[in-house]
Amino acid sequence: MRLSGSNLALHYEDVVVARDLSIEIPDGQVSVLIGPNGSGKSTLLRALSRLLKPKEGAVVLDGKAIEQYSTKEVARRLAILPQVLVAPESITVAELVAYGRFPQRRSIGGMTDEDRAAIEWAMRVTGMLDLRDRGVDHLSGGQRQRAWIALVLAQGTDLILLDEPTTFLDIAYQLEVLELLRHLNEAEGKTIVMVLHDINMACEYSHRLFALRDGKLIAQGDPRVVLTSTLIREVFGIDAHILEHPTSHAPMCVPIAVPHAVDHSPVPAPA
Amino acid sequence: MSAVPAAGAGAASAALARRIRAAAAFAAFTALALGGFVWSVSIGPEHIGFWTIVQGTFVQGHSTGQLIVHIIRLPRALLAVLCGGAFAVAGAVMQSVTRNPLGAPEILGVTWGAAVVAAIATTIVPSLAGVNAVWLSFAGGGAAALLVYGIARYGRGGMSPARLALAGYTITLVLWGLVQGILIAFTQDSDKFFFWLVGGVTTAEWRQVHAAYPWLVGGFLLALLLARPLNVLALGDDVARGLGQNIGRTRFLALVCVVLLTGAAVGVAGPIAFVGLIVPHIVRKFVGNNHLVALPLSMIVGAALVLYADIVARHLDSHVEMPCGVVVAPIGSALFIYLARREKVVA
Amino acid sequence: MSATPVAAAAAPAVPRLGRPGLVVIGLFTLCLLAAFGTMGLGAVRVPQPHAIEALFGHGTPDQVRTIRDYELPRILIAFLVGIGLGVSGGVIQGLTRNALAAPDTIGVVKGAALGAVILLLAYPRAALSYLPLAAFVGGIAAMAVVYLVAFRHGGTTPVRLVLVGVAVSAFCESVIRYVMLHEAKGIGQALVWLSGSLASIDMQSVYQILPWIGVLTPLLALFVYKLDVMGLGDDMAAGLGVPVEWTRRITLVIAVLLASACVSVAGSIIFVSLISPQIARRLVGSRHGLLLPAAGAIGSLILLVSDAIGRGADAPIELPAGMVAAIIGAPYFVYLLMRKL
């Protein structure tokens, strides 16, 4: 198992997000972190990708503490697609994807054949070859996300971490992106770790679900086993039915509505 | 603080506490301002006792002390009060309209528009200096404000707080370069003019008070009238529109108010920077965001600030009497630095 | 993968200005033309073909002296300072991802000016050769303060950096004014220098600034690709292996050194470092390898023209180059504001 974190204490701008959190990421599978806002799922992902330094504990990558690698070395083993993505103005898809080769390239010097091959492959796998000369600003939401994923793929790592890759996309694009990620896992053997907001998408696409609340790992495992109404109540604070998806048989969570409570106490006279 | 009544006994006592705090703030700052006023009039190369001050103010006496009070000290203190209040209220209105805690008439370019025109007047066409300075300041300040407003409004995307602030900053940069250039190219008297540029009430005279106060009073009244609309505007453009407010008109009137107050004040006292930045923050700490209370209090705090700054400035340097702008600016910019550090500041 | 309807329509390829490399060369050629073309404009007019000849020693002693001793240094300084300011502005705009960022907005220019003013006025008998040093110290001190204040939880954000920069500039400005008022006699002279006038430049200043521009600008060439990657966002850049904070610090220091050197020699010229990178961006795109040289060339062009106008427009009155540049630059900047915000 290549990536794990043990006894992590995570702080974000003076707020303690997690204490003594441990996690092991299974190789060759899709792992998804879910939880309410403030549960620490994004913070944990950032810690695993060394974007955030844990106050205590250690993140271990390929047998070594992640801080012991240089930034470039980490980038050669692990790729992260953060939530905030800034595309420079008027850049083409091909140029954007080319940035993914940065960790492999020397400071001075042009692109090697290996670089070019990696870029081509990344664009082919994500279906962006036809759009290679299109400006990134002129892409649809789904296309743009795929372009960024191509960038991350061009890095050539087997470990890919994604922070909410689908949050602002229309549902069609969400499926598009998630299917791509599933393909990358099944056909190319990539280990995928992502934070998702949507519980049902998480269950559909993950091999291993990690449910967090208040910086603690409440449950982990195969969604079919782990997703119960008790878990939903404990993690999200709502009641839900757990059903089975008619086609894929993945578990689905359907919330149970609670009628709005009207306050009948007397209104005090205005001050 | 919101105008929506909150249910529950806890909220009622919170509201009461707020009122008490506001009243206390008013009382305290008014006392401070009055004290500062008296102090300002009494100190100087010739120390003047309290009774003489009273006599000099209300009775046209002929003793030296009373004359000094009447001709020199009184106008100076009055000007400090009026201009301090003006810059402060203008700043409060600006910060509200731009929803940007860094808003100030300087940002809008008004101070510098006024300053440029005044610079041109004093150096290139000297006959225009003096009382007419106020009119010229309006012209300059108004033109700058319109320019800034136009840029912010008609550029792509329409008016937004960030845009207004940035447009204002640019114009300010240009105007500042212009002022300096004019100073150098056209005048031998750069010393004197530079003195004015720093902003202060050192050379105050009655005619300046007379020239400025109608505009300032008008500006203050306009500000008070705008208090409620500004409260609503603070809830956000969409919400305000939803509540039936004409936000374009409110913004425009607010701009007019700022130009009136700043133009007149700059015309007589020069651009005293940062009063408009500091005071609204102090006031907000004490009484929150309700403009009905905040604007009058800003007037008082601004007056106090300039009065005391002037007193300090007079004694800062042993051989030169400094204008109060020299004292306000470092404090103001230090506050600016502190504010810029906070997360919430970005518009 | 599904082809979305958007892809079907005629895809607009990214608009580029032909070959950007040629544009950069073209810009530098323009600089050369401006340099030679504006020779001879000044309080003492030397009509054109004679002006260039005078440069090489042919002509009346007066003409030769005017051109060689008076105008040549100014033109050289305008050229070098323009490059320094343009490149510095380009780096800082890239780092802060903010169109309004420039050495003046992160406190460097005012800090440098403060350092120089203190020297000029408080120690009027100190040798003028200490001026650049004083400016350096001021500029770097101001930037250090800016960085320290803006630095939180191990990093800064682009917006906070600019905001704090503007605040520190304002503070330095207020102290400058105090110092100037305190030493009332020297105000005129200090003001002249402060507003970016190249009136009292001689070859000494050229030798002073040449090493700085000559060493620091090529140094930046090493960072050009990293700066590009940082344009993808801090997280993405870190994810790709760029040591973000370290790169930011070093390039910032180099940019500040460049700007300080320029201020120490030519006073506080604002605006040039603000708009040169913007114009450059529109001409050659945002890849730093092209952007920085282009910004430098444009900065030079602006200053060369500004100085020429300042010299020749209303002779014998000398308008400071900084003021002329501000007037030239303002409309473009207003246009930028209206389009870009």
Image (cartoon, coloured by chain):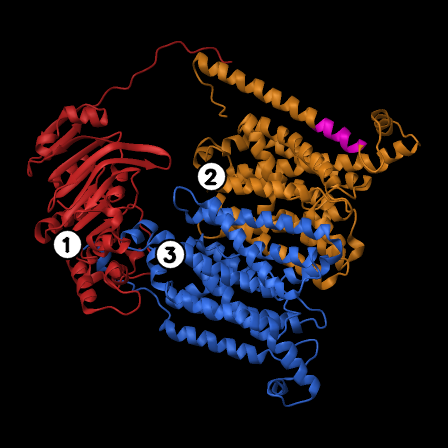
Chain colours: A red, B orange, C blue
Label 1 to label 2: alpha-carbon separation: 45 Å
The picture places residue B253, in percent across and down from the top left corner, at: 59, 39
Cα–Cα gap, marks 3 and 1: 38 Å
Q: Which residues are magenta?
A: B33-42
Closer to the camera, A96 or A10? Answer: A10
In-front residue for pair B32/A8: A8
State which mark lies toward you, 1 or 2.
2
The answer to whether C32 appears left or right of B133 in the picture is left
Across and down, in percent, residue C305 comes to: 57, 71
Mark 3 Cα-neighbour bin, 10 Å: few <14, some 14–19, many ≥20:
some
Give the alpha-carbon distance from disc 3 to disc 2, as whole Å. 24 Å
Q: Main secondary structure of the magenta part?
A: helix
Residue A116 in percent (x, y) is at 20, 66
Say if C209 sits above or below C195 in the image.
below
Q: Quadrant of residue A75?
A: bottom left
Q: Is residue B197 left or right of residue A40?
A: right
Q: What numbered label is drawn on residue C1?
A: 1
Query: Which residue is tagged 3?
Result: C247
- Looking at the rendered image, the disc whose residue lies closer to the viewer, 3 or 2, is 3
Residue B342 disc label:
2
The residue under the point 66% across, 69% down is C199
